[in-house]
């Protein structure tokens, strides 16, 4: 009886084993519709608001912000950046467009109607991409962290680390906020991850390989660009120097 009681006490003292983290679900896609995309656009940011498609690009001397006709790809409005800047992601907030630069630590606040620069702001490290929820701006910097910015002051208010199986996921690039989740391109891959913005946990992955034909892919760069039409519940993806912008439906 003493030995039995001792065995129970030893077992009670052992730490409880937590259940293994379930693997993130990898999903495929279906192409709903294909739209033309400028092959000269080194896409860094993609945004769909109020029926309008906005795009920002990178590379020094070739960075700009555009408003584009979705159906035809025709440029409706464009503002070129100072050639010294390598442009990065954009996000809207009210009547403003906020834009990052890559290594200069300078962000631009533009009038959304005219694209005129109204002010600038600064941040430490690199700027890669932006999205937002209904109360804050969310920023990626190429690491495994997402930063949260106050939309009025553009000061950082916090960060979360993005993890999968408990390990950090870095190279987080272009962002979009879709139905309570942050979707992110992983640079130099055909993968999009779905992130819980409260915990940083990866909820799932989308395998976007095969969007371009081998011939098209040989002339293009990486997948980069996610936009969401909340009113129409439509998801758009494209990439750097891609000839097409795709409306996709996520496969179950």
Image: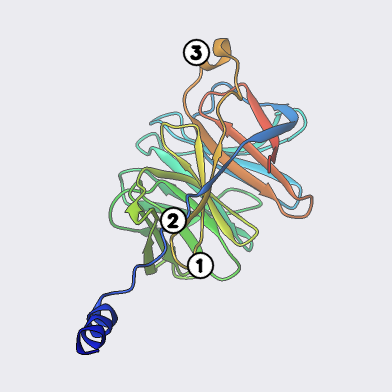
Instruction: Name the residue beneath numbered marker 1.
Output: 151
At mark 1, the secondary structure is loop
Of badges 1 and 3, the one in the foreground is 3
Instruction: Name the residue beneath numbered marker 3.
Output: 218
Marks 1 & 3, CB-CB < 8 Å contact:
no
Of badges 2 and 3, the one in the foreground is 3
- In x, y percent, where is residue 83? 39, 34
At mark 2, the secondary structure is strand
- In x, y percent, where is residue 106? 36, 52
Instruction: Report, in whole angstroms, how far the alpha carbon at label 2 lies from the one at label 1.
Output: 11 Å
- The reply to whether residue 219 is in sight is no
Look at 62% across and 21% down and name the residue there: 243
Residue density around tag 1, few if under 14, some if 14–19, many if 20 or more, within 10 Å:
some
Marks 2 & 3, CB-CB < 8 Å contact:
no
Q: How many marks?
A: 3
Q: Quadrant of the N terminus?
A: bottom left
Q: Earlier in the sequence, mark 1 or mark 3?
A: 1
Q: Quadrant of the C terminus?
A: top right
Q: Which mark is residue 44?
A: none
In the image, residue 59 sits, relative to residue 229, either above or below, namely: above
In the displayed structure image, the side of residue 84 where residue 199 appears, left or right? right
């Amino acid at each position: 009886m003493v030995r039995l009681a001792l065995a129970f006490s030893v077992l009670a003292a052992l730490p409880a084993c937590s259940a293994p983290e379930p693997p993130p679900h990898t999903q495929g896609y279906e192409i709903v519709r294909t739209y033309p995309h400028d092959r000269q656009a080194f896409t860094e940011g993609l945004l769909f608001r109020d029926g309008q498609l906005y795009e920002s690009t990178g590379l020094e001397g070739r960075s700009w912000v555009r408003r584009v006709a979705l159906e035809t790809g025709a440029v409706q409005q464009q503002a070129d950046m100072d050639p010294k800047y390598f442009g990065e992601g954009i996000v809207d907030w009210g009547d403003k467009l906020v834009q990052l630069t890559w290594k200069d630590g300078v962000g631009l606040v533009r009038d959304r109607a005219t694209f005129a620069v109204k002010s600038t702001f600064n941040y430490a490290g690199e700027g890669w991409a932006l999205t937002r929820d209904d109360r804050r701006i969310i920023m990626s910097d190429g690491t495994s962290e997402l930063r949260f910015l106050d939309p009025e002051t553009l000061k950082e208010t916090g960060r979360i680390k993005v993890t999968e199986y408990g390990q950090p996921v870095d190279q987080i690039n272009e962002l979009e906020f879709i139905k309570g989740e942050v979707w992110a391109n992983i640079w130099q891959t055909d993968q999009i991850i779905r992130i819980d913005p409260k915990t940083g946990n990866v909820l799932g992955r989308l395998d976007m390989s095969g969007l371009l034909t081998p011939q098209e892919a040989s002339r293009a760069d990486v997948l980069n660009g996610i936009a969401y039409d909340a009113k129409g519940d439509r998801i758009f993806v494209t990439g750097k120097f891609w000839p097409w912008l795709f409306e996709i439906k996520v496969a179950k």
